Image (cartoon, helix red, strand yellow):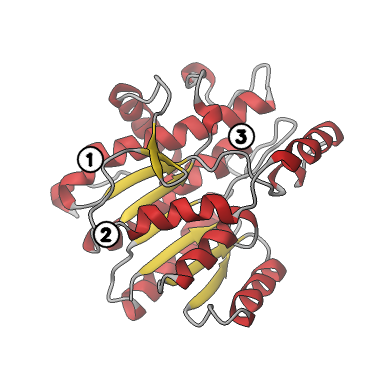
Amino acid sequence: MKTVVITGATSGIGLAAARCLLKKGYRVICLGHNRENCVKAELSLKAEGIGAEVLFFRADLMQQGEVNRVADLLCGYIEKNCEGKLYALINNAGCVRSRYTTTQEGYEQQFALNYLAGFLLTFRLLKFLVRAGGRVIMTGSRSHRGIGVHWKDIMLKDGYNPLTAYKQSKLCGYLFAKALNDRYSQCGLRAYAVDPGLVRTDIGNKQTGTLVNLIWLMRKRHGAEPEVPAETYGFVCEEVSPPAGLCYRDSRECGCGRQVTSKNADALFELSEKLCGIKYPGAGEI
């Protein structure tokens, strides 16, 4: 049985993707921020009769200490129960913030959760992914277009704009997927960004100000149900031969922004290693 890890899996796209992959016969390990929500989601999946091979771990992935703590648990579980192989890691956890707020490390929170948490968690689980010839999937957004990385102020301390921070964090996810492919595709690992489109979730209603909350309440009415984009995650995982493209939407390859280049991917990868205090191994060192 193939094992998949999904972050941000207690609601919205993550929970729908978990449900989709469980129906396809995967063992699904879910990560959520809130213990109560983890229990509720697990009971819900099992009550539907599709969750026999699902389990939840709680972690605040915004904090690097928490990423490393839960990664230790995941490594132990995968080594013992999954033949040391992880078929897919879906880095889906995300947030929106209406003002400049930082993590314990002093990193802007949207950048930390929407991008950097996935960068660090992938590093910790890399050997299991390579063993399985696995796949890394970043939850992207069409909003990554028309923006570049603010290299001189990547945390956007000066003149913070929440939408700019969100767009940049999503662009970073695409760059990370490209960097992984450039480094590890020869090992059988493939990375992707899935653009879910506008989806009816609560991402804009959690820990946001009154204005952002109101805007998102109105905007999400026009979105699709989470089960719609969940099928694209299922498609990327299910294809026997790894899909050749980088970006997918509605189970079809789509284009990505002009800033998604190897040059930018390499620069961000090196910076992210420093921000996480890690060094990814070379392809021949795993």
Instruction: List the residue tagged with mark 1.
Output: 183
Q: Earlier in the sequence, mark 3 or mark 2?
A: 3
Q: Is residue 206 above or below residue 20?
A: above
Determine the image quadrant of residue 114: top right
User: Furthest residue to the right?
Assistant: 210
Residue 133 position, x and y percent, is: 23, 58
- For label 2, count other residues whose C-alpha is less than 10 Å away and answer few (under 14), some (14-19) or many (20+): some
| Image quarter hosting the N terminus | bottom left
Name the foreground residue: 156 vs 45: 45
Name the foreground residue: 40 vs 282: 40
Residue 217 position, x and y percent, is: 80, 41
- For label 3, count other residues whose C-alpha is less than 10 Å away and answer few (under 14), some (14-19) or many (20+): many
Determine the image quadrant of residue 199: top right
Q: Earlier in the sequence, mark 2 or mark 1?
A: 2
Instruction: List the residue tagged with mark 2.
Output: 127
Q: Look at label 3 and name its amino acid.
A: Glu
Instruction: List the residue tagged with mark 3.
Output: 108
Q: Nearer the viewer, mark 1 or mark 3?
A: 1
